[in-house]
Image (cartoon, rainbow, N blue to C red):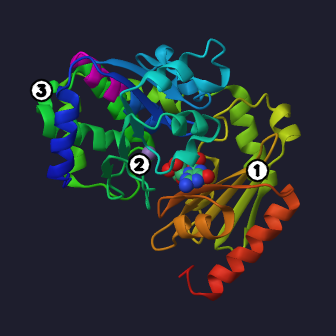
Amino acid sequence: MKLSEKHIGSLRELLARPRLRIVTVSHANPDGDAVGSSLAWAEVLRGLGHEVTCIVPNKYPYFLDWMPGIGEVVVFKTDAEGRAAKAVAEADAIFCLDFNAVSRLEILSATIEANTTACRVLIDHHLQPDEGFDIVFSHPEASSTCFLVYCLVEALYGREAVTRRMAELLYVGMMTDTGNFAFSHLTPELFRAVAALAETGIRIPEIYNNVYNAYTEGRARLFGYAINRKMNLIEDGTVAYMSLMENEMRRFQFQQGDSEGFVNYALTIKKVKMSAMFLAHRKFIRISLRSRGDVDVNLFARRYFNGGGHKNAAGGKSFLTMQETIDHYVRSVREFAEEGRLG
Ligand code: 5GP
Ligand code: MN
């Protein structure tokens, strides 16, 4: 990973100041990479004597409950005592991990925008980051933000600075963002980083089980229902989509995170090049997109669904009804295909 010498220098200088008040923030619907990178980086910062508050806009999925230190993460949405707002207002530095635009913090955005004096540092691997950060580590070639945090720690303090606890946290993001080391950007450097994490004594099968084999019965049955009844194929079987309404989710005692992985499943079909999942929320529909090879769902999400992400994994939102959203998707896919963007 080629990290900017200039920004490494600025970061080193910032962190050399004594007892900073620091906040880490990550994107709405935080995943393993968001939480893992935030908690691991917080651990590094605390080791340097700084005071750190980790904040996420809303709750992380229950299968991350076991992660070391997760109890200290302040969930902005349910933070009745205003701990998050206070920490942000007092912060000398705000680290933005695993997202590329303050708007992706959703309900937390305005609180972050209100602190105009803190040094803003971006550590992220999404495409097209926004302006407005003082120190920027934006690396779309990194498979996860956790890998990026590992590279930063290594560059700043050497790999000996990585504790077992940090290693466990960082492994979660490396594993989840690569689909257990099956997606793109799997570089030799990533596997060297994994080897360094393994050296600390982390138990890799245990971490895998904690994340991937910890779902409820309802989730397993919802998955069967979704694949059997709700998966549709269009464009001669090369494009898939699936939708879930709130009443369908309730029927299977849906908990946030239960639909994790559903959107990927259509890509197990050889012909499928692009897959979408539409999940109804109270106020809007959340869209997840996945693709294979050259099919660029970051572009698709930006153009048609007000979102973004990575080339092969992106997301967005729709404020239309479910049927209108699906119609819009089908039409957009057609346009994309006509431009030759589906290969
Ligand atoms: P997921 O489908 O797992 O929620 O998201 C896939 C990827 O797209 C993640 O890297 C996520 O951060 C990004 N993403 C999801 N929703 C949005 C969105 O509304 N806007 C942008 N810019 N990125 C998104
Ligand atoms: Mn990520």
Residue 265, image x, y percentages: 60, 53
Q: Distance between the residues labelled 1 and 3?
A: 44 Å
Position above or below: 236 against 27: below
Of 314 and 46, nearer the camera is: 46
- Residue 245 lies left or right of residue 189; in this view the side is right
The magenta stretch spans residue 47: yes
Residue at image x 66%, y 14%?
80
Residue range of the region highlighted in magenta in the rendering: 39-49
Residue mark closest to the camera, 2 vs 1: 1
Counting labels gives 3
| Circle 2 residue | 178
Tell me the amino acid under the disc marked 2. Answer: Thr
| Circle 3 residue | 160
Position above or below: 42 against 290: above
- Residue 237 lies left or right of residue 114; in this view the side is right
The magenta stretch spans residue 178: no
Q: Distance between the residues labelled 3 and 2?
A: 25 Å
Task: Find the residue positioned furthest to the top.
Answer: 81
Q: How far apart are marks 2 and 1 (CA)?
A: 25 Å
Residue at image x 71%, y 29%?
255
Residue 285 badge: 1
Question: In the rendered image, which quarter is residue 180 located in?
Answer: top left
Tell me the amino acid under the disc marked 3. Answer: Glu
Question: In the rendered image, which quarter is residue 220 located in?
Answer: top right
Residue 23, image x, y percentages: 41, 27
Residue 172, image x, y percentages: 40, 33
Q: Earlier in the sequence, mark 1 or mark 3?
A: 3
